Image: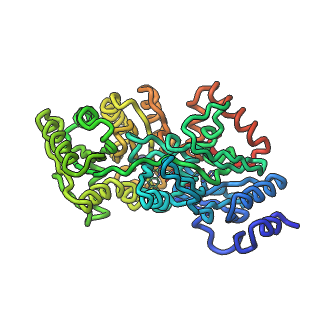
Amino acid sequence: MTLLQALAGAVGASQVLSEGDLSAYEQDWRRRWHGKALAVVRPGSTDEVAAVVRLCAAARVAVVPQGGNTGLVGGGVPDGSGTQILLSLQRMNHVRHIDASNLTLTAEAGCVLQTVQAAAADAGLLFPLSLAAQGSCTLGGNLATNAGGTQVLRWGNARELCLGLEVVTAAGEVWHGLSGLRKDNTGYDLRDLFIGSEGTLGVITAATMKLAPRPAAVGTALAACHTLDDAVALLNLAHTRLGAGLTGFEVMGRRALDLTARHFPALPAPLPDAPWTVLLEQSDVEGEAPARSRFEALMEAALDHGCVHDAVIAQSLAQSQGLWQLRESIPLAQAQEGPNIKHDIALPVSQIPAFVAGTDAALQRRFPGIAVINFGHLGDGNLHYNVQPPPGVDAHWFLAEQEHAVNTLVFDAVAAQGGSFSAEHGIGVLKRDALAQRKSPVALQMMRAIKAALDPLNVMNPARVL
Ligand code: FAD
Ligand code: ZN
């Protein structure tokens, strides 16, 4: 019996796809990696996932787990060899249980993030993980990449929201680690090993996640700043005035907003053009009126201080959604604009203004005419510091010829300020070489030891991360 026949026996012939157009699985969201799978396999249960992994391990065939295929580092698509099994979790999309008194939700890995948010909302609760890809990315993918997004400032990354996991190991065994406990010091934390492992240690099949009470009011404001130093001053003011009520603090550079205006002209433009525009979100347990007055007081203080020169506070849910759309459309506008060199960097917030000034200038000197599309989660010290080729230069050529040099310049500058070259998107294929070069030898050796211990046959997403 061939492997494909055995897999068909495990999950049903209709769930083993090896013919026709499989590009939705084989090509990544950015259309940067075009792979070829031996087959796409779509198990419907944890036991089926385990059976697939056992069959692949016995045949020494690599398994590439995939959720919503929105990852940005090429980790979730097969390589071009035609020998890897693409394991799609899409059919495992049930919310299994909500425990409202324990403030937890247990869902299968293939649940789309928005579905998880909606299930929590239906129970009168909040699942705070939120990112622009939430209509297609999955809970399993969020955990496998330790996704961040727009609420990290208050709620942390996917890791901070996760209490327990169910995992199919590289040997095809099931680890039943679903737990709703906040405290459990019983040895090594296996859960945290799988979070952020990008499919290289096992397949996450379900997770128990933390929920929170729904805020009584959520407010959104937009503020215009002359400099990034001003934006950082506004952040400090917002921390002081709003405390834990500050749930979002996003920055958008002028070029990023120019790009969204060009590609999505119907989006609102409530403030005049400014070098930096900040989107603030406040969540309040007390209700609309106190929330609004706190927000107004913050904006008045910021105008008095001088760190903000213009501001608007959304007056309705629709207005608030419009402001968020502005921010969330930037990656989509960039995708429409064409290939660019993406950086997802983390820095101490205090170092960001100097980093941006110095690195912008160094990039211009070395690659005249490039444009930096700079936006991101300033409250977390996380920038999407993306480099677009100079006008008239073929973007594919620029990426092929200059990406390494651009990355070296940016990553060296990041390292000099004590930052990270991968804040929230992960390593995948894109940053594997950077990891090998820039992570300390001691850290790399421990990572390789963990990989060898949990996946001795190297079947789980090989050649990703390490
Ligand atoms: P996939 O792309 O399918 O997979 C990603 C990685 O996880 C791969 O290595 C894959 O092998 C592995 N994987 C997937 N599912 C499993 C599983 N069940 N078990 C084991 N391994 C698995 N990220 C952020 O952190 N913050 C953002 O703000 C953000 N914004 C984004 C905006 C847009 C428009 C897009 C397209 C992406 C954005 N991302 C962001 C990238 C982010 O990594 C993904 O959106 C999301 O976390 C990945 O989920 P997915 O289900 O699509 O995973
Ligand atoms: Zn982001």
Identify the residue shown where x is 53% and y is 48%. 209
- The type of colouring in the image is rainbow
Quarter of the image containing the C terminus? top right
Q: Nearer the viewer, residue 301 or 401?
A: 301
Q: Which residue sits furthest right?
A: 1
Q: Which of 257 and 16 is in front in this view?
A: 16
Whether residue 342 is situated above or below residue 123 in the rendered picture: above
Residue 55: x %, y % from top left: 81, 57
Q: Quadrant of residue 348?
A: top left
Q: Is residue 377 left or right of residue 171?
A: left
Q: In this view, does 262 lie to the left or right of 302?
A: right
Q: In which quarter of the image is residue 363?
A: top left
Q: Which residue sits furthest left?
A: 304
Identify the residue shown where x is 77% and y is 49%. 173
Q: Is residue 253 visible?
A: no
Residue 414: x %, y % from top left: 43, 31
Marks counted in the figure total: 0
Whether residue 193 is situated above or below residue 70 in the rendered picture: above
Q: Is residue 208 visible?
A: yes
Quarter of the image containing the N terminus? bottom right
Residue 429: x %, y % from top left: 60, 47
Q: Nearer the viewer, residue 19 or 8?
A: 8
Q: Which of 357 and 452 is in front in this view?
A: 452
Residue 368: x %, y % from top left: 34, 42
Identify the residue shown where x is 35% and y is 28%. 351
Q: In this view, does 328 lie to the left or right of 231?
A: right
